[in-house]
Image (cartoon, rainbow, N blue to C red):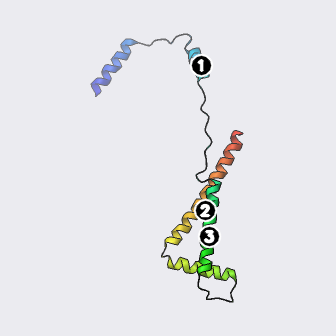
């Protein structure tokens, strides 16, 4: 490999330095001036408002069904106590999958909030 480097070095020395054309800078700047600028396309959220509405309605229906179908052990308790007891029983019987589902849902909400915040901030910075 060292021999190849020496051969190239000798070739460049033999060729010598060449001076660039007089109008080289002007030609480069002319090409740069007509090069179109890429405009970033606005990103769309992963889940639309309609999808989030559907998720919210679905979660509300699941909770409503859990409250309605729960055995009424605390007849004299308030509705919030009944809902809390029902949710606790459902999470205890689910053997962990409900905890994962709840964690994933919270992560989705937080990440969507961050995404929308960044999109809004990007619009104000770019003046869109």
Work out how far the residue at label 1 is from the one at label 3, CA to CA, in angstroms: 64 Å
Residue shown at 60%/66% (left/top)?
Answer: 58
Which tag is nearer the camera, tag 1 or tag 3? 3
Residue denoted by label 3: 61
First of labels 3, 2 by sequence position: 2
First of labels 1, 3 by sequence position: 1
Give SS at disc 1. helix
Work out how far the residue at label 2 is from the one at label 1, CA to CA, in angstroms: 54 Å
Which tag is nearer the camera, tag 3 or tag 2? 3
Identity of the residue furthest to the top in this view? 22
Give SS at disc 2. helix
Q: Residues within 10 Å of mark 3 (few under 14, many from 20)?
A: few
Residue shown at 61%/59% (left/top)?
Answer: 110
Q: Tell me which corner region of the image, top left, top right, bottom left or bottom right, holds residue 31.
A: top right
Residue denoted by label 1: 29
- Residue 72 in the image, given as x and y percentages of width and height: 62, 86
Q: Tell me which corner region of the image, top left, top right, bottom left or bottom right, holds residue 113.
A: bottom right
Q: Which sits in the foreground, 127 or 29?
A: 127
Q: Which sits in the foreground, 116 or 68?
A: 68
Residue denoted by label 2: 55
Residue shown at 55%/81% (left/top)?
Answer: 89
- Residue 100 in the image, given as x and y percentages of width and height: 51, 68
First of labels 2, 1 by sequence position: 1
Are the two marked residues, 3 and 2, in contact with CB atoms closer than 8 angstroms? Answer: no
Image quarter in which the N terminus is found: top left
In the image, residue 39 sits, relative to residue 95, either above or below, namely above
- Residue 24 in the image, given as x and y percentages of width and height: 55, 14
Which tag is nearer the camera, tag 2 or tag 1? 2
**How many numbered marks, from 0 up?**
3
Relative placement, left or right, of 111 versus 16 is right
């Amino acid at each position: 490999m060292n021999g190849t480097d020496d051969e190239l070095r000798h070739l460049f020395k033999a060729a010598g330095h060449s001076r660039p054309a007089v109008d080289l800078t002007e030609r480069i700047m002319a090409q740069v001036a007509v090069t179109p600028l890429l405009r970033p396309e606005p990103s769309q959220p992963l889940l639309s408002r309609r999808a989030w509405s559907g998720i919210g309605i679905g979660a509300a229906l699941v909770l409503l069904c859990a409250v309605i179908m729960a055995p009424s052990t605390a007849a004299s308790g308030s509705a919030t106590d009944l809902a809390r007891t029902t949710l606790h029983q459902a999470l205890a019987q689910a053997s962990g999958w409900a905890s994962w589902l709840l964690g994933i849902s919270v992560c989705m909400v937080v990440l969507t909030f961050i995404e929308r915040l960044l999109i809004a901030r990007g619009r104000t910075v770019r003046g869109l």
